[in-house]
Image: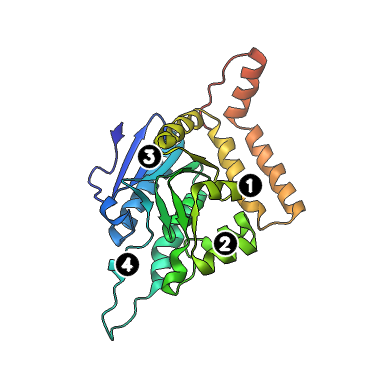
Amino acid sequence: MSAVLANAETIRFEVDAGVAVLTLNRPDRLNSFNDQMHAEVRAALEQVRLGRAEGAIRVLLITGAGRGFCAGQDLSDRSVAAGGEAPDLGASVEKNYKPLVMTLRALDLPVICAVNGVAAGAGANLALACDMVFAARSASFIQAFCKLGLIPDTGGTWILPRLLGPARAMGLALLGDKVSAEQAEAWGLIWKCVDDEALLPTVKALAAQLAQGPTFGYAQTKKAIWASSTQDFETQLNLERDMMRECGRSHDYREGVAAFMEKRAPQFKGN
């Protein structure tokens, strides 16, 4: 693999054969976010955006180092001295967590998450903001905000009801119960739960497969599915019409049809 952002201290970022791998790398803090990690993740996602525009990156895989995926915000960065002024948590959301999940949603390629351990608070909702989520069997998801008198951020109040329905979303948000990877799969919170030792091999194989696929069509599919939750049926049908028109003009569509007619494997370029 060729390393990118070699000077990063809180993440690892590597690109190989069209697959970018972003690893949260503060294992001693369960990969919890501080300001430096936010800045380095932003820089990595900008590399992904530029790499996609150049055709060098066609899939993003996000995972965590060590025994956890991400424990959310590093609270030591938000300590309040006795009698001191409370930090402006809304400013942190606006500066860091809001642009983080909006950038993931806007990337014109599949974003896959491999949850290798606990995903708590913003860490859980970061994972759920990805397009496909795999989790190790020992992993878990916790909406830990209620333990601190907070609300689920990083898109949690939007994502949870749409994935689980209001009853389960409300229960998880108010109680902060731990959800196992197997339960998360059964509820439709994630795509798949796999054995711990199979997690990265499984996800990397899928990423390699997607990196050879019709990336433009994947990006349009992603946009259409995300848009569907806020649009009426006719508006969504119109969006499908417009996106189908764009896909029909793509190189990948022409190559896919030609490969089918010629009974050969397609050679997609991602555009």
Q: Quadrant of the C terminus?
A: top right
Nearest to viewer (mark 3 / mark 1): 3
Give the labeled residue for mark 4: 75
Q: CA distance from mark 3 to mark 1?
A: 25 Å
Give the labeled residue for mark 2: 158
Which one is earlier in the sequence, the residue at label 4 or at label 2?
A: 4
Q: Mark 4 near mark 2, Cβ–Cβ under 8 Å?
A: no
Image coordinates of residue 188 in percent, x first then y, are: 60, 48
Label 4: state its secondary structure: helix
Image coordinates of residue 7 in percent, x first then y, are: 22, 46
Q: Does residue 125 appear in the picture of this structure?
A: yes
Vertical relation: 65 (above or below) 160 = above
Q: CA distance from mark 4 to mark 3?
A: 26 Å
Which one is earlier in the sequence, the residue at label 3 or at label 2?
A: 3
Image coordinates of residue 243 in percent, x first then y, are: 66, 42
Q: CA distance from mark 4 to mark 2?
A: 24 Å
Q: Mark 3 near mark 1, Cβ–Cβ under 8 Å?
A: no
Residue type of the residue flagged with mark 4: Leu
Nearest to viewer (mark 1 / mark 2): 2
Give the labeled residue for mark 1: 224
Q: Residue at x 62, y 28 (%)?
A: 253
Which one is earlier in the sequence, the residue at label 4 or at label 3?
A: 3
Q: Residues within 10 Å of mark 1 (few under 14, many from 20)?
A: some
